[in-house]
Image (cartoon, rainbow, N blue to C red):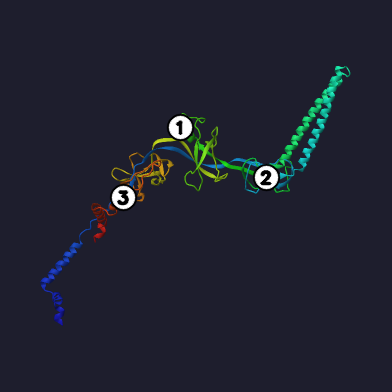
Amino acid sequence: MAQTADAPLSSLLGLSRHSTCQTLLGLLALLWGCGEENTYVAPPPPTVSVSQPARQTVTDYIEVSGNTQASNSVNLVARVEGYLQSVDFADGTFVKKGDLLFVIEPAPYEAQVQLQEATVAQQQATLTQASEEYARQQRLIRQNATSQAQVESWRAQQETAQAAVAEANANLEIAKINLGYTRVTAPFDGRMGRHLVDPGNLVGAGSPTQLATIEQLAPIYVYFNVDEVDVLRVRASMRAAGQTVATMGPVTLGVGLQNETGYPHAATLDFIDSDIDQSTGTLQVRGSIPNEDYVFLPGMFVRVRVPVGTTPDALLVPDRALGIDQRGHYLLLVDANDEVEQRPVQIGALTGDLRVVTEGLGADDRVVVEGLQRAIPGNKVEPKKVPLTPPDQPRPPPASAPDSAATPAPEAAGANSGADGAAAAPAARP
């Protein structure tokens, strides 16, 4: 037992001295190989899609906010005194011009008309008598059978009777007008508000009593204010085109509601105020919307787009390519070294899905339009050029993919596998 404990390791393992040396050398070689340093292979730069700005003549616009107002709005009032007899419409309904809305008790005014008709008849009889007597006196004076004073007297009575008839006719006309006021009718096609007085109440006592309100909604007006800088810009554009307010012709405005995208409704410019409000530095302008489907109601907040001129060869980029930070809008560009640059720009109107860039962009600049999240300023990228079609040109139809496109070419497959292998190289090393 003592000999077994003192035996060498090679004897216990059943190995010869030569085999033991080879085993130790192999272990040392393995340890030496594990001591080599790993080599990092950088991944390829990310691929982004770039386009040069589209060039196109575009219409310049200013975008403002406004409010709608009824083209006609009337407070219907009781113009004669009396008890309200009936309300002949349903609250909130549309009515036509001339439709009966209210009736104020007509009986006292009908009696007044009859009274004035009798007065007219009475005064007419007096005039007839005075005219006949004046004619008889004229015959008598030619026969020296009456005095000149008598002739003059009957002539005065005739003229007085004529005036009395005219007065009676005027009073009759007033009585008829007051009788007409007992029937309140719609002054134009419009929408009624709610009635403010119930039947049986006394109205028109001492002062006119408001009965209801009617508003004309088709057409409807949109009022908005343009600041002085934009007014000067428009006037300069008109002078350059040789136009005046009288000769510029109809101007079409774009109008949009809060829940709408863009400006789907058209309005016609029909009023420009004569002076600028000194307190706000703005000029009031009005447009008229047909509103035949009654989409707009008075008091709505709307967005208005006003054309102010045209810009030839404007530069346009996809609106989605624009970013914004504390300094304003910017674009991500790829320079000649394929490095990403963040450049501040000034923007203009939106035309379709393209945005006009007024400052900060050149016609030959490469703008990142896809893969924005992979384009980091200062880093290199692999740009892939894609065409950009202006909004007024038809977009090219997508090309049908050939069968060979489904299977990559051997060179492309090799390139892809090489790129993938290079990207995976760091992970393959221990």
Type of amino acid under label 2: Leu
Quadrant housing the N terminus: bottom left
**Marks 3/2: CA distance?**
72 Å
Give the quadrant of residue 71. Answer: top right
Q: SS at mark 2?
A: strand
Which of the two discs, 3 and 1, labels the residue nearer the N terminus? 3
Label 2 sits on residue: 101
Q: Which mark, residue 47?
A: 3
Q: Position of residue 266 (x, y in %)?
A: 50, 41
**Marks 2/1: CA distance?**
50 Å
The residue closer to the viewer here, 249 or 148, is 148
Q: SS at mark 1?
A: helix
Marks 3, 2: nearer the viewer: 2
Type of amino acid under label 3: Thr
- Taking the image as drawn, is residue 327 in sight? no
Would residue 294 be found to the left or right of residue 50 on screen?
Answer: right
> In the image, is residue 292 above or below residue 309?
below
